[in-house]
């Protein structure tokens, strides 16, 4: 039977748990399957999220080749050609370096990418790589920025007509407000009367978790019954565990590792906290808002586009543990304000940051670009 759907091939570095990967999973969930056929290519092998895509019927190819392997671009060319790709959609720099020349070589009609992070020094490996990356992006039809701040940071190096903002979104039906069981609270390390703070993110330098640990230590020293549960894995885990011991807050902190879903943690939590030094538009913040949890986070990247300071939560300066602790303590002491902020955050997430809205806007972009390509 003839399949007249448009094939869209997404290329990402890996399918390990991460923000870009979870955004891609929502594309798999909500993209119109009557119009589009979705395929996913991961440059690295062994991604923990691969089964989630396969359960949705999305073909996944994990290449397992190093970026320096000369076979990589050849493999990508064959994939684009064999799938009759109409749209190649890249996520972050390395897939652009490897995949964009391959897509151009076999004349994939539409080539887009999503920038999931702000532009910063060191994002690519040295000035020559940065110059090459900026030159490569000029041959893209469109660059999608996941927040206004991300767009502003990249704007000096991208034709403004090719730069669009489509904010990250989350499944607001899946991430919905509900009460927590005592078992869920216990699993997160909290007992009756404890003030449970949830945090989500990779254990990497940009997330600034040492500052959050300092803030929790400060709260505990003031007599606040603070407990912190961090969902996420990464290279700094052992270092952060040792840091918590040194800060004197280890008894109040639980490192949960990479967990398949954070809904149970967010349901159990009294509040969500972020300590990032650099961000695009973090899904953890949006998921917490969608679950009706107030958010205290640093004013970096797209956080200020999601969190309305004083209405849905609090924004604090990055790298300032005492400001973070102060905002958390203020909300610990005002239950009514926490409830009101959580309700306002839920309404804002549903209105502005739903995954369905994100995917619908991306489909509109796909349709426009595919139509322009066929008209050439």
Image (tube, rainbow, N blue to C red):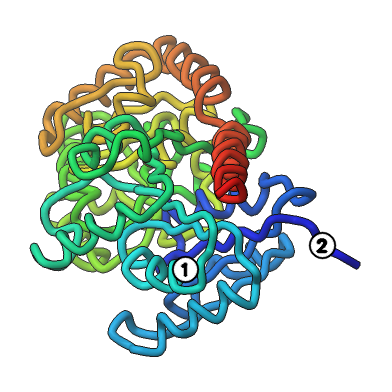
Camera-side residue of 353 and 190: 353
- Ranked by sequence position, the earlier of labels 2 and 1 is 2
Which residue is the site of mark 1? 103
- Identify the secondary structure beneath mark 2: loop
Residue 98, position as x, y percentages in the image: 36, 72
Residue 193, position as x, y percentages in the image: 42, 30
| Label 2 close to label 1 by CB (< 8 Å) | no
Neighbour tally class for label 1: few under 14, some 14-19, many 20 plus, Cα within 10 Å: many
Residue 67 vertical position relative to residue 192 in the rendered view, above or below: below
Q: Residue at x 42, y 45 (%)?
A: 142
Picture quadrant of residue 195: top left
Quadrant of the rendering where the N terminus is positioned: bottom right
Neighbour tally class for label 2: few under 14, some 14-19, many 20 plus, Cα within 10 Å: few
- Identify the secondary structure beneath mark 1: helix
Q: Is residue 182 visible?
A: no
Residue 115, position as x, y percentages in the image: 35, 48
- Looking at the image, the residue that sits furthest to the front is 376
Question: Alpha carbon of mark 2 to alpha carbon of mark 1: how far?
Answer: 22 Å
Left or right of residue 225, residue 318 in this image: left
Q: Is residue 22 visible?
A: yes
Residue 181 vertical position relative to residue 337 in the rendered view, above or below: below
Residue 337 vertical position relative to residue 285 in the rendered view, above or below: above
Left or right of residue 26, residue 252 in this image: left
Q: Residue at x 24, y 49 (%)?
A: 207
Camera-side residue of 192 and 365: 365
Camera-side residue of 178 and 314: 314
Which residue is the site of mark 2? 3
């Amino acid at each position: 039977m003839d399949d007249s759907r448009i094939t869209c091939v997404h290329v990402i570095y890996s399918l390990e748990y991460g923000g870009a990967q979870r955004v891609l999973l929502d594309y798999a969930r909500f993209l119109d399957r009557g119009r589009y056929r979705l395929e996913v290519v991961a440059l690295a092998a062994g991604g923990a999220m691969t089964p989630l895509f396969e359960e949705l019927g999305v073909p996944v190819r994990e290449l397992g080749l190093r970026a320096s392997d000369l076979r990589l671009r050849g493999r990508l060319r064959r994939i684009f050609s064999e799938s009759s790709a109409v749209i190649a959609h890249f996520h972050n720099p390395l897939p652009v370096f490897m995949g964009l020349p391959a897509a151009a070589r076999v004349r994939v009609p539409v080539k887009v990418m999503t920038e999931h992070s702000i532009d910063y020094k060191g994002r690519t490996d040295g000035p020559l790589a940065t110059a090459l990356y900026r030159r490569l992006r000029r041959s893209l039809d469109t660059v999608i920025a996941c927040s206004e701040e991300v767009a502003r940071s990249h704007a000096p190096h991208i034709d403004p007509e090719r730069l669009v903002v489509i904010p990250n979104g989350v499944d607001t039906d899946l991430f919905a407000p509900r009460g927590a069981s005592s078992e869920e609270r216990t699993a997160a390390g909290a007992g009756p009367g404890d003030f449970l703070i949830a945090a989500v993110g990779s254990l990497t330098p940009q997330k600034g978790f040492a500052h959050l640990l300092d803030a929790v230590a400060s709260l505990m020293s003031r007599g606040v019954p603070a407990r912190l549960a961090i969902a996420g894995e990464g290279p700094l885990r052992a270092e952060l565990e040792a840091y918590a011991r040194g800060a004197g807050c280890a008894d109040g902190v639980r490192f949960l590792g990479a967990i398949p879903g954070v809904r149970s943690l967010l349901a159990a939590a009294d509040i969500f906290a972020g300590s990032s030094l650099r961000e695009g538009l973090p899904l953890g913040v949006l998921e917490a808002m969608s679950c009706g949890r107030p958010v205290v986070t640093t004013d970096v990247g797209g956080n200020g586009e999601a969190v309305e300071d004083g209405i849905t939560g609090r924004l604090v300066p990055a790298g300032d543990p005492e400001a973070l602790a102060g905002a958390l303590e203020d909300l610990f002491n005002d239950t009514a304000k926490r409830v009101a902020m959580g309700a306002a955050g839920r309404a804002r997430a549903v209105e502005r940051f739903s995954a369905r809205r994100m995917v619908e806007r991306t489909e509109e972009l796909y349709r426009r670009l595919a139509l322009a390509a066929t008209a050439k």
